[in-house]
Amino acid sequence: MSGSGPFQDKPSIRVEAVTLARGLRVLTRDLSFAAGAGELVEVRGGNGTGKTTLLRAIAGYLKPKAGAITFASADEPALKLHHVGHLNGLKGATSVRSHLRYWAGLFGVDARDEEALAQLGLTQQADLPARVLSQGQARRLALSRLVIAPRPIWLLDEPAAALDAQGREMLARMIEAHRAKGGLIIAAVHEALGPTPSQTITVGA
């Protein structure tokens, strides 16, 4: 999966004078930046300053209070991106392998679960229910949807949370492989992911 070819449709996102709010509270005012193929954008800020809200706005889950978020492609943005939130979104009674096959069916691709299991370091846990996984293994499983169905844009909310040193190295390799194919990553982080970011955005009113 990591060896698949470059993306034909080069991703590009432009955030223009965006203001984000939660209820009546303004989180971020007049935020502007642009990012394209091969870039890693790290979004920083304290707790509650709007990092998660920004990712959700880019994903199309909510509308900014002001400003605009645009994509280069005329296609539906949801078909071009993966959003992995800070919650893993796993079903406790469902096996690791079944999660992979479910996501493959949801995204309309061949499962290729053995390859994904090996890449994520979950081969030995393949037939275990998600509820018995460690927090780090659960995070690896949540991230596996990125390799199950390649999409050019990744929106990642604290992707390294609960990962050990080996898991962080795995994530860094995934990010660099995605960038090499022309992918775009926007990640909300408290600590640097490892790969050198193209730009760092700070949110907060």
Image (tube, helix red, strand yellow):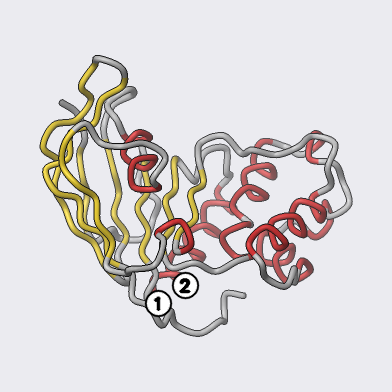
Q: Quick check: 133 left or right of 58? A: right
Is label 1 in contact with label 2 (beta carbons under 8 Å)?
Answer: yes
Q: Residues within 10 Å of mark 2 (few under 14, many from 20)?
A: some
The N terminus sits in image quarter: bottom right
| Above/below status of 116 relative to 191 | below
| Above/below status of 197 relative to 36 | above
Q: Position of residue 164 (x, y in %)?
A: 58, 44
Q: Position of residue 37 (x, y in %)?
A: 31, 71
SS of the residue under disc 1: helix
Question: Disc 1 versus disc 2: distance between alpha carbons?
Answer: 5 Å
Q: Residues within 10 Å of mark 1 (few under 14, many from 20)?
A: some
Residue 44, picture quadrant? top left
Residue on which the image places disc 2? 177
| Above/below status of 118 relative to 103 | below
Q: Amino acid at mark 1?
A: Ala
Residue on which the image places disc 1? 180
Q: Amino acid at mark 2?
A: Ala
Q: Quick check: 35 left or right of 146? A: left
Viewer-proximal residue, 133 or 63?
Answer: 63
The C terminus sits in image quarter: top left
Q: Quick check: 197 left or right of 7? A: left
Q: Quick check: 187 left or right of 143? A: left
Q: Position of residue 13 (x, y in %)?
A: 26, 60
Viewer-proximal residue, 94 or 115?
Answer: 94
Spot the residue most to the top. Answer: 24
SS of the residue under disc 2: helix
User: Which residue does the image show at 80% across and 60% down from the upper left?
Assistant: 123
